Amino acid sequence: MQDAKNLKEYRKEIQESLNNAFLRQTLDTFAVAYRAGRTKAFAEAGIDVKSLVAEIAAAKDGMLPRLMELYDQFRQNAEAAGVQVHFARDAAEANAIIAGIAAATGSQKIVKSKSMTAEEILLNHALEDQGLQVTETDLGEWIIQLRHEGPSHMVMPAIHLSRHQVRDLFADVTGAHQEPDIEKLVKVARRELRSRFAEADMGITGANFAIVETGTIGLVTNEGNARLVTTLPRVHVALLGIDKLVPSLTDALRILKILPRNATGQHITSYVTWITGANECAAAPDLKKEIHFVVLDNGRLEMAKDPLFSQVFRCVRCGACANVCPVYRLIGGHRMGHIYIGAIGLILTYFFHGPDKAKNLVQNCINCEACKDICAGGIDLPRLIKQIHVRIQDRQGHPLPGLLLGQVMKNRKLFHTLLRTAKWAQRPVAGDDGFMRHLPMMFFKDHDFKALPTVADQPFRDRFPGLQRKTVKRQGPAPPVKAALFSGCVQDFIYPEQMEAAYRLFADHRVAMSFPMAQSCCGLPLQMMGEARTSREVAIQNIRAFEREDVDYIVTLCASCASHLKHNYPVLVADDPTMVEKARAFAARVIDFSSFAHDVLGLTAADFAGDGKAATFHAPCHLCRGLGVHDAPRALLRNAGLDYREADESEVCCGFGGTFSAKFPELSAELLRKKLDHVEATGAELLLTDCPGCVMQLRGGLKKRGSRIVVQHTAEALAARKKTNI
């Protein structure tokens, strides 16, 4: 459970987790195995994952306008079957209801099956304060209960612990020596827990589904403990969020198709249990089990009414967003969540536990979109996380760096003047190789894991007129394709050679190009810092800069820019009907470099004179996930005559993340280290990518290593191997 008061304290906690070698190795091993297992599970079942996710999202969204109506129907049907249904507005009320049930039924000993909703309301603490004996019976939950800590994953709560730690824990509990053998430790747990089941007065579970048409609840588990909890005690209490409502069994089974596969790569879990009404129970005086369903709000209804955050209701609690998160993989759930873990946890923490618990967590999103890409409900998790960051800053105040950056970026002329001035200011620390010899004093020693580039002598906007004059003479009248170039700030002022390479490549294939001088930074850095208002102003400036361009495409060599321009601009101006139409028209023309070169221009092997150099590719997050582009850059490299070698985890984040690398350098450095290890293992001479930010991160890291691997933008590699030249 993360409770740091400020970012400085939070970073100290992060460093502690980074120093935990076992945790890092465990999460690494799991992350790699999980991806393979998940892919296999869906493929073997022949499931169209995107279609299934869309069906789940549509069904969940369709419930929202009649949520309380569905709750009333569920309550009526459950009560008709002999269940007592309670509605709890918040955690305190839910705890009071369950404690009251225990008092009314004379229950003293309680066994529980794993429930994140119970963790959310700190139910165990509330019941223990009433003098009740509460025992978790899921193996992982029992372990962390004995350790007096929270879960580090929603599905695998004790994934952060080694068998040696569990051995020592069980030795303390039993007072006997234990072996660090997993099967033996499981037997110890079963032996210790067996009497608890037999003696329990009450069993408490969660629920994965609450089926409206029958008043049924469904539980999805991998251990037999949940069935014992629901059958042996004379009283059963099921605690569930109102978001678990589904209209019919068909809706529940649809979710069941994706839940185990997305959670753990299983086709189906070991146990799927459906409970309708009060069943027989020999331990009860009247031979009938007493069953209570406690349906919890605790901020959920507020989310349901929110036009943006209502999509959180699609969450099926599979935990996949943590499984693929590169940050979670480094530091685990105790640092990547308060109670709920991973990307969804960053959001739920804000609504369930308040902005103070969420303010540090939401900044620890690198915006790689891996969570969005894998979400079983199609939730736009990165966008929601950033919006929570905005809300917290609007409420508690914006940090000075963000405010200053916003003031500079929304004034394009000032911003570009400062970038031009930097060319002169950097001279005392600039080397002859395009890198700074040492970091300026404004950077801390923590940022010294990579070399930083210098600002170019001449930005691309100053080079463009000369390039255009030469090209127009040679192309002749009416080129078949018209494109406007969007450079962003990094390729304009730091890596103009990347833009120039693309220009020459396009010119040889009769593309008429323009470069609106009023364009500026795409605004993504502002978005990452929670400066939504100034991000919107920058978006409007860029839309207006391109609106008079008579072109078929707006081509950018930065995948992050492309994704931001295409997906976020219409959202940023959604409150202005006139501007949103312009934004949509603008976004419709945006295309990334590789898609333009491969899909539009149709470049083939006949266009290149390859040299057979060994090359590998790092897929920028916003290319492979933000834009869904996977094959085009790799096909281009093969067509260019390069000896292409796929690196392990080529689509995992390199650790740049724009302002993320400045805010969390320790995480950025570790992500970069792993990325470069995979690159070097290929034996490649060239490392290519489609993002200037990734170039900066990768090139700077390899420079620090003293590596001879050359890092280039894909455009540079292709331009160097094209058959004709201007």
Image (cartoon, rainbow, N blue to C red):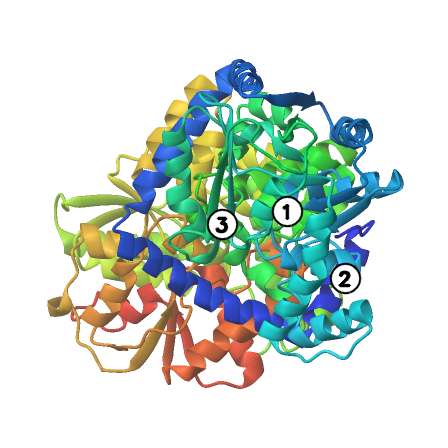
At a point 16% along the width and 56% down the height, the residue shown is 602
Q: Residues within 10 Å of mark 1 (few under 14, many from 20)?
A: many
Determine which residue is flagged by label 3.
371
Determine which residue is flagged by label 1.
113
Is 307 situated left or right of 462 in this image? right
Is 154 situated left or right of 59 in this image? right
Is 308 situated left or right of 233 in this image? left
Q: Residues within 10 Å of mark 2 (few under 14, many from 20)?
A: some
Q: Is 128 placed above or below 43 here? A: above
Q: Nearer the viewer, mark 1 or mark 3?
A: 1
Instruction: Please name the amino acid that badge 2 sits on.
Output: Glu
Q: Is 376 placed above or below 682 here? A: above
Determine which residue is flagged by label 2.
13
Instruction: Please name the amino acid that badge 1 sits on.
Output: Ser
Precedes in sequence: disc 2 or disc 1 = 2
Q: Residues within 10 Å of mark 3 (few under 14, many from 20)?
A: many
Q: Is 341 placed above or below 442 here? A: above
Precedes in sequence: disc 3 or disc 2 = 2
Is residue 700 among what the camera can see? no
Instruction: Please name the amino acid that badge 3 sits on.
Output: Cys
Q: Nearer the viewer, mark 2 or mark 1?
A: 1
| Image quadrant in which you'd find residue 607 | bottom left
Give the spatial CA distance, label 3 vs label 2: 23 Å
